[in-house]
Image (cartoon, rainbow, N blue to C red):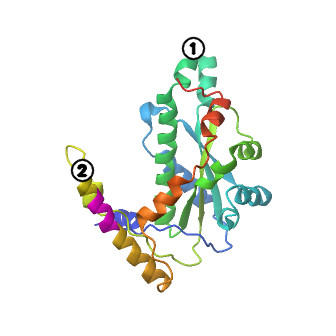
Amino acid sequence: MNKVIETILNHRSIRKFEDKPLSKEQIEAIVASAQAASTSSFIQAYSIIGVTDKEKKKKLAELAGQQPYVEKNGHFFVFCADLYRHTLIGELEGKDIEPSIESTEKFMVALIDAALAAQNAAIAAESMGLGICYIGGIRNHLDEVVNLLKTPQRVIPLFGLAVGYPENLSAQKPRLPFKHLYHENTYEENTQTLIDELKEYNEIIKKYYLDRTGGKRSDTWTEQMGKMLEKQSRMYMKDFVEGQKLKLR
């Protein structure tokens, strides 16, 4: 165990922040940490937009599903998959890169690059005593987010990262136990084993909610996931991505 691992293991989502902005030095350190993340073949297929304008943050909070912590935080970052600059590279170098840019592989590279950068940013922020919360809700209305942030084609805003000084620390939700998640050499495909593990985890989550709410809530993980996955959400995404000149091949 060391301080880095302690910081990682101490993670919890923070949804209430003090009214205190991050300093320029903190923002630069967080972005520099994001850039230090691994990037596939040095492609660096992502960009980060810091949103400081109060009206823009208010609108993003509305678009994300009326989430107040999108508006009220120390700083709000939006992580984007970005293949626009690579389009410019093709023009600069006189290369036909469009088939590659439109490949599913390069799109996956951009998503992975952005996610790795964001997690580095999150750990850097938490190491400073700050709290963070990922915001997938910005994908609820991407057309409006794109207009608000003025992102060009081949740039996809993926998620937000609210960062700030925690007003209070929320409890940590128990993750899947190690033996449920970690497979060695081959994937454990025994259906009964997997079902037994899900039932075991359900009891852990049920106890977590019972303790946290004083007995007012007792749903299980599979109940939550079943309800969530039954409801189709953001089903426009394929059309949106293609509309951004990323007709994946």
In the image, 146 versus 237, the foreground residue is 237
Q: Which mark is residue 96?
A: 1
Q: Bounds of the magenta span?
A: 195-201
Residue 156: % across, % down? 62, 39
Position of 191 relative to 177 (above/below)? above
Position of 157 relative to 182 (above/below)? above
Q: Residues within 10 Å of mark 2 (few under 14, many from 20)?
A: few
Q: Is residue 114 magenta?
A: no
Is 102 left, or right, of 203 in this rendering? right
Q: Mark 1: which secondary structure? A: loop
Q: Residues within 10 Å of mark 1 (few under 14, many from 20)?
A: few
Q: What residue sits 64% from the left and 40% below the top?
A: 236
Q: Which tag, 1 or 2, sits closer to the chain's start?
A: 1
Position of 203 relative to 101 (above/below)? below
Q: How many marks?
A: 2
Quarter location, residue 196: bottom left
Quarter location, residue 3: bottom left
Q: Which mark is residue 197?
A: none
Q: Which mark is residue 183?
A: 2
In the image, 81 versus 24, the foreground residue is 81
